[in-house]
Amino acid sequence: MSRLAQQPGERIDRSQPVSFTFDGKPAAGFAGDTIVSALYAGGRRVFSRSFKYHRPRGELCGCGQCANSLFQIEGAPGIRGCSEPIREGLRVVHQNAWPSLDFDVMRATDRVGGPFTPVGFYYKTFIRPRRLWPVYEKVLRSAAGLGRLPRRQDEREWETEYRRRRCDVLVIGGGAAGLAAATRAAELGADVVLCDEDAVLGGLLGIEGGHERVRELEGRARDAGVEILSGAPALGFFDGLVPVWQGSTLHQVRADQHVVATGAIQQPLVFADNDLPGVMLSGGARRLAAAYAVKPGERAVVATVDDRGLDDALALSAVGLDVVVADLRPDAGGGELAGRIRAAGITLLTGHTVVRAQGRDRVERAVVAKVDARGRALGDGSTHDCDLIAVSGGSAGALSLLLQAGGRAIYRPEIAGFAVTELPAGLHAAGAAAGHDRAEAVEVSGAIAGAEAAAALGRSPNGVADARERLAQLPAAAPVATPPAQASDGGRRGKAFVDLDEDVTVKDIKRATLEGYDSLELSKRYTTVTMGPSQGRFSQLPAARVLAAETGLDLGTVGLTTARPPWSTVPMGVLAGRPLEAAKRSAVHRRHEELGATVRWAGDWRRAYDYGDPVGESVAVQAAAGIIDVSTLGKLLVRGPDAGELLDRLYPNRMSNLAPDRIRYGVTTSEAGRITDDGTVCRIDDETFYVTTTSAGVAGVEQSFTWWLETWGLNAHITDLTQGVAAMNLAGPQARGVLTGLTDLDCSAEAFKYLDARHAEIAGVPCMLLRIGFVGELGYEIHCPSVNAEHVWDAIVRAGSKVGLRPFGLEPQRVLRLQKLHVIVGQDTDSEMTPYGAGMDWIVKLDKQQDFIGRWALEHTAAHEPSVRLVGFTTPGGELPTEGAVVLGTDGAPEGQVTSARRSPRLGQVIGLATVPAALAGDGAQIWISDAGRRIAATVTTKPFYDPEGEVLRS
Amino acid sequence: MSLAFLTAAGGASAPAALSPFDAATTADGGVFEVRDGWRIASGFGHPAAEEQACEHAVGWADVSHLGKLEIQVSADAADELAGLAGGLALGRAVRDRDAWWCLLTPVRALLLCDPGVLAGLRQELEANAALKVLDVTSQFAALRIGGPLARETFARFCALDLRPERMPVGACMQGSVARTPGVVVRMATDQYVLLTGAALAIYLWSVVSDAGGRLGGRPVGVDALSAPSELEEAGTHA
Amino acid sequence: MSFLLTCPNCGTREVTDFGFGGEASTRPASRPSARELNTYIYFRRNAAGVQREWWHHRSGCRAWFLAERDTRTNHVIWTALPADAPAGQTPA
Ligand SMILES: [Zn+2]
């Protein structure tokens, strides 16, 4: 393993060797190394295979921005090797190559050549016949793709937590500009958070020899109280909320002011075989040397269009590389740097660029030539032996977050790129993202942005005008040459890539343009250019240039595509947060668990479906007694002088004439006359009603009731008591006896009639008893304070055990209520069901004086026969249809469906509810149910199967 | 008929009221005693560690036994409501007569009090015909969360802006907490009371334990956090 | 969508605190014709721009209030309890 001598500001700790494995083979590095820097130091040059053609790919950016070195680390695919630190024992595996990274059989798609996979190939080829798509998909997914998701759930655990952070100022980017901005704002008294995706702050300054200055700036920021999050990319801008991912924490930062100092991204150049391993951004090569003391090559050709490339060339030369520079600018910028290049004895070819990379699977030679404005080589050029082509195709400001936050991008020819303008209030740009490129200007612009952010918060910064003055007087950036859409030597072989992530070539964009995809947004969708993991960082500008050249438009008109969040790759598991579900539990829940209940979700509640014996439980209810926890029922208290009036307007039936201590069933409907919920209404006194709703419906009912209350301006209050009041239903022939033993209340049939409500103490606890019976037996719904619910439950179970009482769950309850044809809203009704369709014509009181919700629609409905009606049915043959099975009309077309079906132990037959065509809704009608290939004969009934006259219920 | 069934059983022979956290505090090794008719966790068997947590990290105590009253008025009686306890205001928790008075809307207030004074306050308020008073004690689970990392703990499960300038001592804030409606009262620099629906107590306990546990916190007995709050000391002017 | 919304009672909260109540519309004062009823029940303006709409502070004080919001940018112009809402034309 070879390393350079100690580099000033290097990140590695040579006293701490780290061992890990790559594709099962041992690899080594130092603490502070990334996967790529360690492997590169060990001699590896191929880090991935490309998406489509499986071409070998080397490192490109060196800083976690490109998709050239994505790896699989244990359960996680798509990990960026050039930013992910190595750890002892880490197991790193390559992606998207078989059988190995160095020999990939799928490379044939590349070698056999273009005709096989032209742009749009997949769209055009696999669209027909549609039924074969699943087959195609399987093959394509294994051939393409970037990694493998773990199959087993337990391999997917992510220990991520959310942390909300409110602050005055969020600074995104911890380079010189960001640090200066954060420090300035914090020194002015703002609460500041700064985040940077790199593990080490400093940005470009730290790599370009300014590590001492970085240390100073960082120290000042910390002293000023800035909260610094490093190794923490900002993922996007969501209406002011910025998620910042840092290891096991997702910070959800909400700031009043944002300073975006995300720097600039060095751009590649487009020429034939510009993806050969060994073609690297000059900044990436320099970074390998400066941060990790890794020599990026022996002989380098540096191709540049700007001063940054020259500066990088000097740095590469300084660490011992043999360097030749090809600068596209006729005068190499005409500045001091060109002089220093020459003084260092480096060959400088002005007006030249690289037109082709050559080599088998890695760079061996570069062809350098003078080119015209369209990129065509003038003459044959010269060939240079080299193992590194370091390119600097200009800088593109990292504008995505600014654009997501509402900024607008405009093209500026003098920087050969886009700049952002029209920043919305509260958004500030600084440093290279704001178009500054010299170190001093970057830092000053940061300090100004920090002061402006503080000023927007009401602080009074001094010296902002002076700083602006100073910034204006700093020397302008050196001119940048606009690189051609493609530099070409006219040779016919080789691919020139505009997008390495997606394997999109110049030819692909041209072809797409010919096929009519002549705007960037269309081209993006057709060719998938800019849609890869690096989010267009390196392909936006090159793609726009090709399109501009093809269409004759200028770059400003071609524009940029929208880079959507996330700006940095993030595992889905990180976004999923903690695995805790907001489950509601009844106050008796512990007892259900002790009884071994089958607990399932019912809406947002955890409920006992049964206690292991649903048949036995339902039999016990009918033979003796049972108790079911119905605490999930919604419970609303409606109080006030206008309470009765309010309910009259909310229910289709009358509630205001209900006598105190009496109960009435009601359904609520929408303005369209559709059933929205049901429950009981109990009058407690003149001004007080106790309303129950379905378990799932209470939130919606409360919202709707309060909205109408507000709209009508009635004098009443609504309080949701659902969670504070427990409820249990004691039912069965022995229910009265059980209850009588627990209370002083006269429970006789004469004193406590069906649909009566009574107050009583049960086992010393104040309760309200409602004599109603969803399950069809003599029954009492007992409502009590939830804090006493266990005590009441225990007392009833203890008293009832002598007569055979059993707790019963939701499943036996469903069978029992089906025997009575009691409807469950949401199960037996859908969003189109009216009270008429549900066979509840009697509940709609159109003779009522008041207007009520749904009245107009129901008047209309009443005048027309509903197309389907909800009725009961039995299957004489004993088949149990699936819920949702289709009910056929007289002509055999599907016209209704089975909404509930069960085998009733008591009746010894299959019973159910179904919507059937009105013509077949009469007693005794024969219907056909089509159920996954079965045809089941059924007989319609409109009367309850059990206790049709309600004698048991009233007994 | 009456609304008596909303108030927990009282009297000498009445069963002890169980906090909605009871299953969770029991599972976490709570040591219980009966106080004011409630079974209350007075500790979790590690007094030193509990004290440490409150002093250096975060502790959370079940205080669901605190009495809670809802007061509602009609729109024309809003002034009557705002005039209670020497003056109520939206977003404030006013300390008066061993209770915190929180005006939640111009026509609705929530009172949080020691169990011993619940009945008396209720009687007094009910004497005013303009006020509709309801005992909602059972409706809410209540946690007292305290310690230097209390605010950081909240940040792990709620987006409420609890920065001191927005949430000074004596402030009351309603909003989503752990994805469920919540009410937070800041009683002292590092002390908060959190109310959520009773049925969500077990879930909430797991959320707070998950967040607080990662920050070095732990469940503590009901008295661990009951050092006199600044609010109590400062009276209604907090 | 993660903008902030200010409840007139509670103050500023994440939008996830609230339930969306749809465009403000008016219930016909008297029995509508079939066509009017249909329009009232099923038709919305769905404006791309500023609209007046209902919000419910579901996770907080449970009050309903009105807001004017630009549906293109999620910029909220004002929020107010119905009694305090600025007079303005409520789309039918
Ligand atoms: Zn509110």
Image (tube, grey):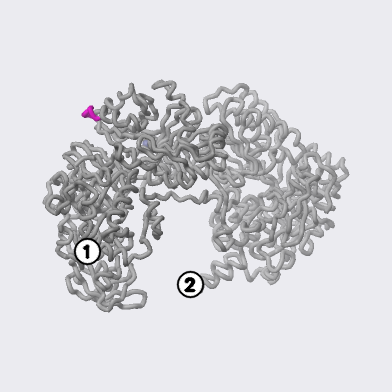
Q: Chain of mark 1?
A: A
Q: Which residue is mark 2?
A: A130
Mark 2 is surrounded, within 10 Å at the Cα level, by few (under 14), some (14 to 19) or many (20 or more) other residues, namely few
Q: Chain of mark 2?
A: A
Residue at 65%, 34% in the rendered image: A179
Same chain letter for marks 2 and 1: yes
N-term-proximal mark, 2 vs 1:
2
Check disc 2 and give the amino acid type: Arg
Q: Which label belongs to residue A127?
A: none
Give the mark count: 2
Mark 1 is surrounded, within 10 Å at the Cα level, by few (under 14), some (14 to 19) or many (20 or more) other residues, namely many
Which of the two residues, A330 or A933, is positioned nearer the viewer here? A933
Q: Which residue is mark 1?
A: A820
Q: Is residue A83 magenta?
A: no
- Specify whether tag 2 is near ligand 1 (CB below 8 Å): no
- Magenta-drawn stretch, dominant element (helix, strand or loop): loop
Which of the two residues, C48 or A788, is positioned nearer the viewer here? A788
Q: Quadrant of residue A864?
A: bottom left
Which of the two residues, A611 or A158, is positioned nearer the viewer here? A611
Check disc 1 and give the amino acid type: Lys
Magenta-highlighted residues: B126-130
Residue B38 in the image, given as x and y percentages of width and height:
37, 38
Residue A421 in the image, given as x and y percentages of width and height:
56, 38
Q: Is residue A309 left or right of residue C20?
A: right
Residue at 21%, 62% in the rendered image: A837
Residue A146 in the image, given as x and y percentages of width and height:
62, 60
